[in-house]
Image (cartoon, rainbow, N blue to C red):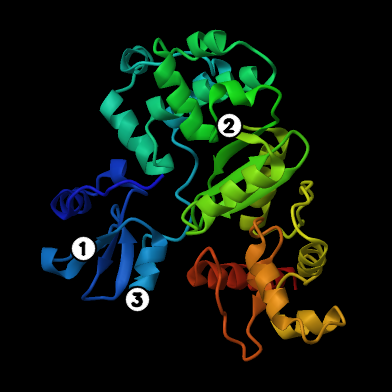
Amino acid sequence: MLFQLPSDDVLYTALVERDPSYEGLAFVGVKSTGVFCRLICPARNPRRENVAFYDTVAACLESGFRPCKRCKPMDPIGEPDPAVKKLLEAVDQQPERRWYEADIVRMGYDPSTIRRRFKRRFGLSFLEIARLRRVGSAAEKLASGGRVIDAQLDAGFDSGSGFRAAITKLLGQAPAKLRGRDILRADWIETPIGQMLGIADPHALHLLEFVDRPALPKEIKRLQKRSGAAISIGRYDPIDGIEAELRVYFDGNPDGFKTRLAKFGTDFQERVWHLLRTIPLGETRSYSGLAESMDKPSATRAVARANGANQIAIVIPCHRVIGANGDLTGYGGGLWRKRWLLQHEHRMIENQR
């Protein structure tokens, strides 16, 4: 889901023109002021030699820039783009359809603009997402016992080898090996601090992680191996549920998370994760403190490893665990996010008083 930014010259032109089509695609760090901004920031344009461009808020913060108070680059971008929303709804209604740029034109949109908007939001073009949905739909047919040739043609592949390659790349198995297998579904979830990936079965959430977490590919492979299930692009109810609950959380309403979680750890890990969920909002614990509360004072390192093995970010709040000396210590989603989440939760508590 990573993609290469346009050249600095292109981005600087977008900054000078305050081009809204680049909103969210990149951020600019201004060396002379030490702040980073959206490309549509209303502040006076900085000199070309005083700027550096980054693709994420994380990169800006890690480079030492602080968020601009005028354009507030860490705030949510806003409601989903109407064109993006409409096209995604169209794919939801016809997941097996083979889409072309001509279809985008018939719906009244410019293909290059749509490509840029989807790339900015998801790291994939609309046609790439539609293709993945076709492949995912075909994979589900295979898992239920359908014939390979029928699934191939339904997915819009004239070439059998091309179809098998696409299925294998997406799900890690050749089509013929998918018969009778369970299918997990995966989809993106927008948050104010970056996109997350949710993976679920019809009954429970298996994974919720930030898409730029370095360990995410390994986590997905472990999930596939442990569950014996293939993963398809799409949604089950638990993803819709956790998306709604995350929206409430980021809006500052501490209602808690109720989406059912799949059990995926050892007995010890499950104990640690249960304990994490008992840490009150706005509070923190140390690894050693957690070990002592489990009557295992010598298990501090084991607690830390269990904390790091958590694959349900925010809901199982491993971000609330800090070092005994008060340091933030590591966090798979980035220390800047850990700090942001703790400050956000502290504000929620303050607002309740």
The secondary structure type at the circle numbered 1 is loop
Indicate the amino acid at tag 1. Arg
Circle nearer the N terminus (1, 2): 1
Q: Which mark is residue 232?
A: 2
Closest to the observer, 275 or 27: 275
Closest to the observer, 226 or 129: 226
**Which residue appears farthest toward the right when viewing the image?**
295
Q: Is residue 248 visible?
A: yes
- Disc 1/disc 2 C-alpha distance (Å): 46 Å
Q: Is residue 51 above or below residue 9?
A: below
- Disc 1/disc 3 C-alpha distance (Å): 21 Å
Which residue: 43% across, 26% down?
165
Q: Which mark is residue 64?
A: 3
**In the rendering, at what x and y percent does residue 305 appear?**
66, 71
**Which residue appears farthest toward the bottom when viewing the image?**
325
Which residue: 78% across, 37% down?
203
Circle nearer the N terminus (1, 3): 1
Indicate the amino acid at tag 3. Gly
Which residue: 45% across, 49% down?
77
**In the rendering, at what x and y percent does residue 259 appear?**
77, 46
**In the rendering, at what x and y percent does residue 124 appear?**
39, 36
